[in-house]
């Protein structure tokens, strides 16, 4: 039973920053890859960023250079630092654990947190 608890979403202006957090169980965080995905109503869930057990990071081209995924092992938490936010970043953001690559490879998901970027 793996629980993922997200926080950090909100309403910001274009160019602002947000940091999303996702707390997971220790065993899941330490032994599996974790990622962030986003989804707008009526759209498919898309990959944003991922980090594997070795600490290697991966990013979608649309966010590379603006977003950073990181881990805090002491807190069993993964973060997504989002800088230079754009209106097109507006989505519900979901953290995932237990996989790597596409959304279908992940076993556990958070509840989602809304990010809204106004122009």
Image (spheres, helix red, strand yellow):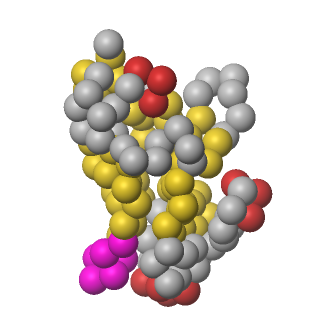
Q: Nearer the viewer, residue 97 or 71?
A: 71
Quarter of the figure with residue 61? top right
In this rendering, does residue 28 appear at all?
no
Residue at (54% x, 61% y) in the render:
58
Quick one: quadrant of the C terminus?
top left
Residue 76, compared with residue 14, is above or below; it is below
Is residue 39 among the parts visible in the rendering? yes
Relative to 16, is 108 above or below? below
Q: Quadrant of the N terminus?
A: bottom right
Residue 85 coordinates in the image, percent (x, y): 34, 32
Residue lying at the far right of the rendered structure: 104
> Image quadrant of residue 83?
top left
Write the residue at 40% across / 60% down. Answer: 69
Up-down relation of residue 73 to residue 6 (above or below): below
Q: Measured from the top left, where is residue 41 in percent x and y?
A: 62, 24
In this rendered view, identify the residue nearer to me: 8 or 101: 101
Rendered view: 41 above or below 83 = above
Looking at the picture, how far across and down is residue 113, in whole percent?
42, 41
Rendered residue at 25%/22% (across/down): 13
Q: Does the magenta portion include 86?
A: no
Provide the residue span drawn in magenta: 71-76
| Front in this rendered view, residue 14 or 28 | 14
Total count of labels: 0
Q: Position of residue 79 (x, y in %)?
A: 35, 60
Q: Residue at x 50, y 84 (%)?
A: 54
- Looking at the picture, tell me which residue is in the foreground, 96 or 46: 46
């Amino acid at each position: 039973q793996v629980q993922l608890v997200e926080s950090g979403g909100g309403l910001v202006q274009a160019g602002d920053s947000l940091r999303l957090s996702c707390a997971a169980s220790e065993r899941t965080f330490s032994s599996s890859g974790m990622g962030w995905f986003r989804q707008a109503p009526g759209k498919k869930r898309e990959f944003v960023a991922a980090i594997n057990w070795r600490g290697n990071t991966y990013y979608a081209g649309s966010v590379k250079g603006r977003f950073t995924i990181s881990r805090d092992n002491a807190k069993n938490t993964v973060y997504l630092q989002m800088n230079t936010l754009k209106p097109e970043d507006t989505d519900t953001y979901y953290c995932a654990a237990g996989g790597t690559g596409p959304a279908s490879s992940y076993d556990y998901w958070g509840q989602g947190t809304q990010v809204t970027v106004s122009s």
